[in-house]
Amino acid sequence: MSNATPESNTENKLPFVLAITGASGSIYGLRLLQYLLEIEQPVELLISKGALCVMKEELDLDFGSIDQPEAFISRVLSYLSLPVDLPDHVALRLHRLDNYGASVASGSYRTMGMAVVPCSLGTLGAIASGLTESLIYRASQVALKERRPFLVLLREMPFGHIQLKNMLTLSEAGAIVASASPGFYHKPKTIADQIDFVVGRVLDQFGFDHSLFKRWKEDAQPLPYFSACNQIETQESK
Ligand SMILES: Cc1cc2nc3c(=O)[nH]c(=O)nc-3n(C[C@H](O)[C@H](O)[C@H](O)COP(=O)(O)O)c2cc1C
């Protein structure tokens, strides 16, 4: 909650499409959602049944049924320690996955891009195969065909041959293929630090300004001009 960088000019932002699927690590998707709403970024939210199952198992969370969207959203917001009444310009829209008439099913509905966080292997395979049986798959195809930023966050270890091929297919189609692999160079102390590292690197891919983790060399003093020249000369003279 404390690391968000509030932005002015919050109105008229294009929405961010966030899909949370049933891979381990649904906390990454929830933390990303929390951050986006904190900075007053409109979000189109897609959550698979598999994700709901994982949330129950990993986080002891039960948001209820997506068929009752208002109750569902207020439970999600309450879990994320966000006010249940979001400001009018901060839209959080939850979509049923069988609603192919939803805004995000069409390329003519403009968005700033889409992330699948985390992305299960099943969803990875479906997107790589061009399937559209779920609104998550259809919205993914839309993001790719419209050449919008599109990211999948995998958590698997190890990867099999089929998943590697699917990742390559998506990368060749323009997707950003990311893995939930927290670094250690920012000296994390807690699991929350690790989660924020991964979520921060996802946000980086979409150009969001944030301070969810300390960047490499963030505190380094810039080299004085002459000192930098000396270094170059020294290296060249070797
Ligand atoms: C606790 C738990 C953890 C799971 N972790 C993973 C995982 O890391 N990767 C994965 O591909 N599937 C995982 N699964 C299985 C998927 O949830 C399952 O294949 C589901 O059908 C995926 O559907 P979806 O892509 O529509 O969410 C997990 C299931 C449970 C219950």
Image (cartoon, rainbow, N blue to C red):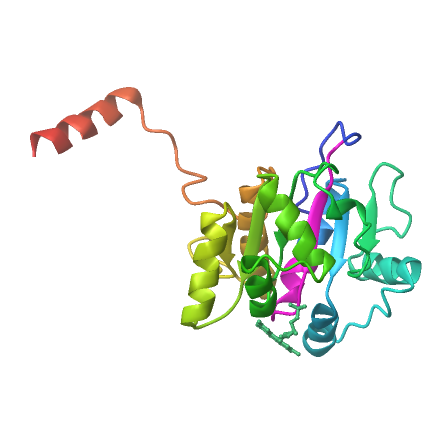
Rendered position, 48 above or below 141: below
> What residue is shown at x 87% (from left), y 62% (from top)?
72
The quarter of the rendered structure image containing the C terminus is: top left
Looking at the picture, how far across and down is residue 108, in whole percent?
73, 36
> What residue is shown at x 50% (from left), y 70% (from top)?
156
Rendered position, 65 above or below 127: below
Left or right: 147, with 19 as reference point: left
> Is residue 186 in the magenta section?
no
* Residues shaded magenta: 13-30
Looking at the picture, how far across and down is residue 178, in whole percent?
50, 55
> Is residue 22 in the magenta section?
yes
Looking at the picture, how far across and down is residue 220, in whole percent?
40, 37
> What residue is shown at x 77% (from left), y 40% (from top)?
40
Q: Which residue lies furthest to the top in this view?
A: 226
Q: In what quadrant does ligand 1 lie?
A: bottom right
The reply to whether residue 31 is in sight is no
Rendered position, 30 above or below 159: above
| Residue 71 quadrant | bottom right
The reply to whether residue 65 is in sight is yes
> What residue is shown at x 76% (from left), y 48% (from top)?
44
Looking at the picture, how far across and down is residue 55, in whole percent?
72, 71
Along the line of sight, the residue nearer the viewer: 165 or 86: 165
**Number of numbered discs:** 0
